């Protein structure tokens, strides 16, 4: 029987709602480098490549986006404020704590609009009536309206992220240099096509390469390495490896080491 040699990366996969996960191999032919076209999907510790030199590989941190000419944290700091979790911004006007609202507005410098003001803005004073409680509203002409109880703020808080927002990050490069305030339009990321994702089998022969791709750090049949192909915990995949060094194998899969698969 003819065997196939694939080059790619080690990884894991778990479907939403799936208890546990499986060990997998991603075919390099289904991995593409692409520009960062949107801020969505960016996260701390994401691996990136220098657009001008793809041998430079880095990990990003300190994500920021440009909002109305000002660089701000990617995640609005208001969402980490203890008052936010009990405020009307998070809980809605009916359940939110108005004192927390005031403290947040004073601290972060915004104006908050509750339902009365928002309804007047939308339909005009005297042209609406709340029936019982929000969200039930009836207009002067009898039209029934579903009107949510989440207040609005000026300026918007938490601030939103637009599809085309400009972003910048800090990058820790593999050459030892840390670059701050690097525009993400100067970076590349990998996009993986699921067509190239292969669930590992006991009969597969794996060859794992070092980070610099210069030497083989491990090779052998999956069955002889004693990898657990399905596990309800990540650590469980590696707790029976023959050399006992499960942390090494965790690193191979979490850092998506380059590998070859013969099956």
Image (spheres, rainbow, N blue to C red):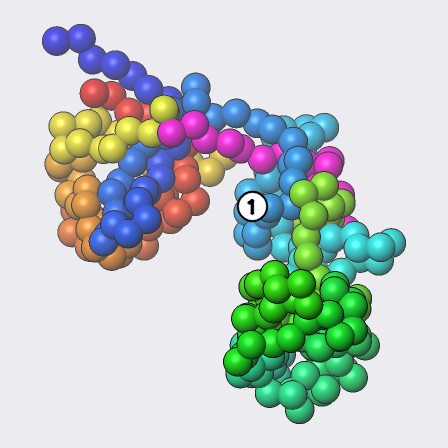
Q: Is residue 187 magenta?
A: yes
Q: Residue at the far front: name it.
A: 141
Q: Is residue 31 left or right of residue 150?
A: left
Instruction: Report the label total.
Output: 1
Residue 30 against residue 85 in the figure, above or below: above
Q: Nearer the viewer, residue 27 or 118?
A: 118
Picture quadrant where residue 195 is located: top left
Residue 39 in the image: state x and y as whole percent: 65, 45
Residue under the point 78% across and 68% down? 124
User: Height in image: 206 above or below 61?
Assistant: above
| Residue ID for mark 1 | 41
Farthest residue to the top: give it: 2
Left or right placement of residue 72 versus residue 254 in this view: right
Residue positioned 71% across, 82% down in the render: 104
Answer with the quarter of the image where residue 70 lies.
bottom right
Magenta-drawn segment: 180-194
Measured as percent of width and height from the top left, residue 18 is found at 25, 50
Left-right relation of 207 to 89: left
Q: Main secondary structure of the magenta part?
A: strand
The one nearer the camera, 11 or 89, is 89
| Residue 223 vertical placement versus 115 (above, below) | above
**Mark 1 residue element:** loop
Disc 1 packing (10 Å; few <14; some 14–19; many ≥20): few
Residue at 35% x, 39% y is 11
Q: Quadrant of the C terminus?
A: top left
Q: Quadrant of the N terminus?
A: top left
Q: Is residue 201 magenta?
A: no
Residue 216 versus residue 92 in the image, above or below: above
Q: Is residue 248 visible?
A: no
Residue 100, can we see it? yes
């Amino acid at each position: 029987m003819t065997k196939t040699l694939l080059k790619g990366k080690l990884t894991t996969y778990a479907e939403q709602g799936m208890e546990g996960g499986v060990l997998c191999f991603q075919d390099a032919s289904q991995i593409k480098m692409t520009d960062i076209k949107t801020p969505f999907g960016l996260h701390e510790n994401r691996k990136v490549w220098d657009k001008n030199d793809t041998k430079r590989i880095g990990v990003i941190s300190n994500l920021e986006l440009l909002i109305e000419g000002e660089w701000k944290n990617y995640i609005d700091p208001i969402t980490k404020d203890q008052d936010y979790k009990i405020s009307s911004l998070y809980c809605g006007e009916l359940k939110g704590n108005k004192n927390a609202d005031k403290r947040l507005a004073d601290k972060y410098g915004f104006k908050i609009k509750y339902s009365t003001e928002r309804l007047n803005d939308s339909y005009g004073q005297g042209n609406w009536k709340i029936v019982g409680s929000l969200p039930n509203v009836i207009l002067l002409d009898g039209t029934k309206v579903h009107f949510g109880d989440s207040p609005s703020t000026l300026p918007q808080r938490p601030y939103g992220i637009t599809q085309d927002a400009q972003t910048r990050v800090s990058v820790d490069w593999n050459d030892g240099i840390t670059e701050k305030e690097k525009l993400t339009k100067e970076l590349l990321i990998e996009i993986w096509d699921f067509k190239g994702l292969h669930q590992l089998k006991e009969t597969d022969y794996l060859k794992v390469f070092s980070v610099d791709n210069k030497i083989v750090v491990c090779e052998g049949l999956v069955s002889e390495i004693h990898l657990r192909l399905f596990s309800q915990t990540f650590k469980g995949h590696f707790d029976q490896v023959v050399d006992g060094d499960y942390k090494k194998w965790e690193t191979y899969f979490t850092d998506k080491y380059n590998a070859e698969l013969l099956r």
